[in-house]
Amino acid sequence: MEDANVILNPAHWQVFTLSLVLSIGFAPLCIAASLSTIGTSDVEAEAAKQKMAVEWQSCFRDLERSLPTLSPAQKKWLKNEVYHEMADGFITRRTMYAMDSAEYDISVARPHVEQTISALDRLASGQFIARQQEIRLWAFVAYQFVDYKFWQAVRHLVGRDMLDKKICGVSWPNAYLENATLWAQQILQKAVIFNE
């Protein structure tokens, strides 16, 4: 499973920056121009960013606790039905059936939640080797927040009564992604672009 540490690799940073720009709709020049100035020494601004991280950390930990865990047999079934087939370049009816299963939704949602928590844990600690590390973590969290495939999996699990409908304070499944997009915009405003 890819960890947030891997995302901090500069080689991955450009891909995530581009994806973030495309997902959120901000002009690349705005983000690029702000990269060197992200973060501030202002105590209040740092405390506000840390508070955001702690709130989202709590929300995603609650979600992690509610998510089912796949058994080894379920993981093996998914590997055979989905990942082997797709690696060979084929999408069969069996693959489509497997991708429409609760097991597949769990396999999408759980690693995503774990990676998001890992990044939020580091942001909540407020301990960074350098400002760029903090910048990349915030960008990664914003990227995670706007991942359509993740929120689609969550909605499916709610529809299957495998998750509670109220997630991170939102009770309407069709609004999960919209709410998370507002979070991502808040990250860009407070932690990335304007350093409020």
Image (cartoon, grey):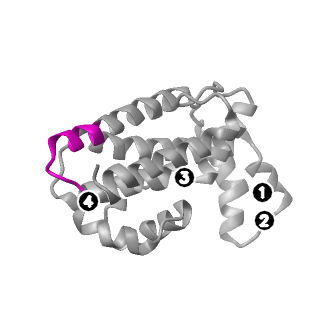
Q: Nearer the viewer, mark 4 or mark 3?
A: 4
Quote the CA–CA distance across marks 1 and 4: 43 Å
Q: Give the vertical position of 88 relative to 92 (above or below).
A: below
Q: Nearer the viewer, mark 3 or mark 1?
A: 3
Quote the CA–CA distance across marks 2 and 1: 6 Å
User: Does any portion of residue 73 appear in the rendered image?
Assistant: no
Residue 37 locus on image (x, y percent):
23, 64
Task: Say which quarter of the image contains residue 126.
Answer: top left
What residue did someone put label 4 on? 38
> Which of marks 3 and 4 precedes in the sequence?
4
Residue 101 locus on image (x, y percent):
75, 43
Which secondary structure lies at badge 4?
loop
Residue 68 locus on image (x, y percent):
59, 31
Q: Which residues are magenta?
A: 39-50
Q: Which mark is residue 91?
A: 2
What residue did someone put label 3 on? 146
Q: Is residue 156 left or right of residue 19?
A: right
Quote the CA–CA distance across marks 3 and 2: 26 Å
